[in-house]
Amino acid sequence: MKSPLLYLIEALFCSGVLLAFYRLLLVRRVSFRACRRYLVASLLLSVVIPALDIPLYPAPEPIPGSVAEPVFPVSAAAHTEERDFAAVAAREPLQPEPVDRRRLLRGGLAAVYGAVVAVSLGFLVVRLARLRRLRRGARLTPCKGYTLAESPQVPTPFSFLCTVYMGPGYAGERREMVLCHEASHVRHRHSVENLFAETVRCLLWINPFVWIAQRWLREVHEWEADRDVLDAGYDLTRYRIVLFHQLFGYNPDIACGLNHSLTKTRFAMMTRFRKQRHAALRFGAAIPVVAGMMMLCSFTTRDPEPPAATPRPAADDAPRLEVCLSRDSMWIDGTPGTGDDLLRRIVEKRDSLSEEERSRMTVTIRAARQVQMGAVADVKELLRRSGTLRVCYETVDGRAGIARLLPPRIETLPDTSNAKVEVWELSETVPGDSKYPDSYHLKIAERNYFMVLINARGEILAGTWGHLELCDVEALKVRAREFMLNPSDDRTLSESRPQEILLPDGRTEQYGVSRGVFGIQTTRKTPYAVYTDVQQALSEVYAGLRTDLSRQWFGQPFDALDEAQRKSVQQAVPVRISEVSRNFATK
């Protein structure tokens, strides 16, 4: 969906091109009716073309660095230095995110623009109400093709819709010329075109080309009415004298009247204008102009076809529902749909399953590389609302899925030894590691929380409080493993709690279970591909730790263990990967 600023820029471009075409090829070269229709069409096209979203072009691969600026809850000093993330690590812990001045500015500008639109439309309604009140107080006389409303409150004649307004003091040939002129406005429905142009001007008041088009449209109206008066047989010189008498009159700007556009050009058009030949060819030249504007402003990148399902191991027989995301579309099991459709399909799927199958039901989220995390977060929220917590993240390049569980939101209460109040969401863990109640209260020290921040450009900032560093995925694996093991008993890394683990053969092993938790925080514009890379990297860290422990206890890798042995290792190395739901704050 286009931003309001982009829409206004494209509307400005379209209206400017259309008016330039009118001035160069049409005005004084085609009939007045053709000029009127073109100007009205140009106003309509300048509103409609930028609003169209026609998927035509193939979706391009994202260009590194082309995504919007990152949004992280870092200190104000970090924001002023263009987010030098490496420098942040050496300074201070993360602080609450400062006020987004850009967002406030955009909101303020939108409010001002909307206020001007509302005031303009209000004035238009007031003027219409005044005309209605004037008509009610006037003496009405039905005439052929219009109604004559005579009132002493009308200083100079004008017409609006099917009514001609006239004041006292008009008689003889002068009255006939005036009525002929205004009857022409009524017959050609000039007031309707004026009302349409006025409405467009109220909505796009910031576009100067709309004001110009409205003025030119009124000019053509007067040219056409003047021509009808002269074609009716009235003398040119006497008609010009009548126009001079009306020069200092007044009439509403949304109405049609003799004193509009009283210029040298108007007098010249009474005698010199002759419609040139090949007018149809001139209008035909507008077709490629409109087509070009649509290619620039209306045609957008086409969504890719729903990606084919990734083959899964035969042992993975859990009921599945697949959600595929593109830039702005969603497919549910290969069928285009919306969020409401997803909720409905999940309910239908769950109703058809047994209780045991419902507990294993998994929703696979597959997304193209250009998809941003905002769309994925919306889908995850829908899954929570439906009570479907098992999710598998995949990408369209066919990488293996990353299994996670979406438990309820969890609030962290302040630890007596911790000065920080942290509100976060323990939203991801491998199914089978833990069981979660409806609510959860945890206490966690700073050293036990390893933050992984991914900005909108796909850059990764990772570490514990006050020790954040910019790193890539491979460096993240090294730092995450060091955080979990903490071989040198570093007070800035996670602590462990000795725990007796009962093995299937009856033995007990004393093992220091790490209390570390990984917290992933993204923006709505974070690339999905980087998010899955981070999830995969943390999964590999846990897999490596479990494999090392499996070899130590059972002499074989974790994947080769039976179910009982796996549970023992999982108890010693639980997967704790969270996703931050709010910004961290200090007490």
Image (spheres, rainbow, N blue to C red):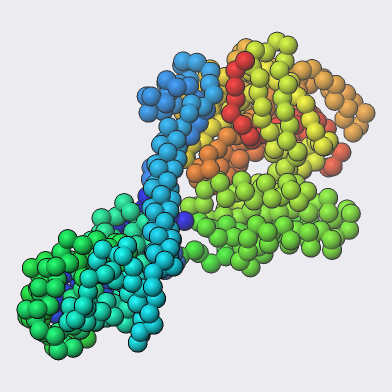
Nearest the eye: 108 or 554 = 108
Q: Is residue 34 visible?
A: no
**Screen quadrant of the C terminus:** top right
Nearest the eye: 429 or 335 = 335
Please tell me how many numbered marks the rendered image carries.
0
* Depicted 506 relative to depicted 219: above or below: above
Quarter of the view holding residue 88: top left
Left or right for 274, reference 308: left
Residue at 42%, 66% in the rendered image: 137
Q: Is residue 5 visible?
A: yes
Residue at 22%, 71% in the rendered image: 169
* Depicted 345 relative to depicted 395: above or below: below
Quarter of the view holding residue 223: bottom left
* Depicted 203 relative to depicted 195: above or below: above
How far across and how far down the image is residue 213, in percent?
25, 64
Residue at 58%, 44% in the rendered image: 532
* Depicted 555 relative to depicted 469: above or below: below
How far across and how far down the image is residue 447, in percent?
63, 17
Left or right for 101, reference 395: left
Nearest the eye: 318 or 525 = 525
Quarter of the view holding residue 102: top left
Residue at 63%, 64% in the rendered image: 337
Among all residues in the image, which is located at the extreme right?
506
How far across and how far down the image is residue 69, in percent?
42, 38
How far across and how far down the image is residue 318, in percent?
78, 56
Nearest the eye: 522 or 38 = 38
